[in-house]
Amino acid sequence: MLYDIFSIIAPVFICALIGYTWVKRGVPFETGFVSTLVMNVGAPCLIFSTFMDIELSRSAFLTMAGAAFITMVIFGMVGFVVLKLFKLDQRCYLPGQIFANVGNMGLPLCLLAFGDEGLALGLTYFTVNIMFGFTVGMAISSGKLSFSELMRNPMFWTVIVTVALMFAGIRAPAWLYNTTDLIGGLTIPLMLIALGVSLGRFKITSFRRSVSLSVLRLGLGFITGNAIATLMGMEGAARGILIIECTMPIAVFAYLFALRYDRQPEEVAATVVISTLMSFVMLPALLWYVLP
């Protein structure tokens, strides 16, 4: 079991370390280009090729999507109350409590821990997270709700087409599957390297507050993931994936929203760094808990 856990964690650490070392050595890394490439090309291709390759039942897909929706609603409600009690800026900190790093960090763990089925279930959670992130998350940071950003996101249309084909039992032609599979293969390594780069660039401010918000995100995620998995009768890979994705650290795009709408981005960056470092420390225990 210990070797299995090490085998899952090692690729995540090594890829993130490559990105961290890269930026600390002063080598240029175009984060904007890589992020755009991953979100607009890599991730849609990964979603399409994964769901075209694996037999994931309609009920399994809908159950995970529903669980993702419920958990994010809980994160939002609890986060709102806690931030209100401590008189912290909702537009600054609430997106980070709702949206975890289920992409850069969560997807590799889902794949390495539970194989292709885990990746498909992780992508299901990821797509719900992204759709809410680019609507509700942006609305919280900006102060207004707009669906135009989501409509312009290739991932949204990829999910619509992929789910329609999957439910209809239609398989993609070999040339299309092979192309998207090849491009999608770039996504997870690039996500982890970009995560390492982000950790290398972010600076920590307000250490005590960042630690408190990080503990809230990780602790609430673990408790909520367990509770919803139990209430919905989820077992095996589905249970493990839900708990893993819920217990991920604060999402990097929470910082990007704060930067875009000038919501104390340095403060949000500190919570991203602290929660990610804490998550790395607790990963062995988390994997030991969810692995069969």
Image: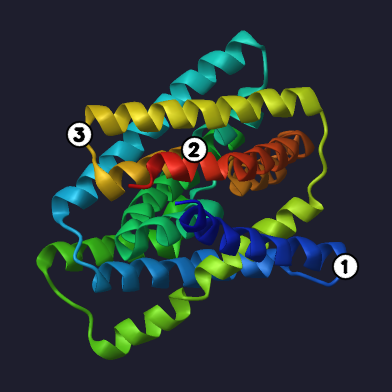
Badge 2: few (under 14), some or many (20 or more) residues near its Cα, within 10 Å? many
Alpha-carbon distance for marks 1 and 3?
48 Å
Which residue type carries mark 1?
A: Arg
Instruction: Using the image, tell me which numbered label, if any, was put on residue 56.
Output: none
Instruction: Using the image, tell me which numbered label, if any, was put on residue 247.
Output: 2
Instruction: State the residue at coordinates (71%, 42%).
Output: 273
Instruction: State the residue at coordinates (57%, 69%).
Output: 189
Residue 117 placement: quadrant: bottom left
Label 1 secondary element: loop
Counting residues from the N terminus, which is met first, the one under dot 1 or under dot 2?
Answer: 1
Q: Position of residue 66 (x, y in %)?
A: 26, 39
Residue 143 appears in the picture as rendered? no
Alpha-carbon distance for marks 2 and 3?
19 Å
Counting residues from the N terminus, which is met first, the one under dot 2 or under dot 3?
Answer: 3
Q: Position of residue 86 (x, y in %)?
A: 65, 11
Instruction: Using the image, tell me which numbered label, if any, was put on residue 233.
Output: 3
- Residue at which label 1 appears: 25
Q: Position of residue 241 (x, y in %)?
A: 37, 47
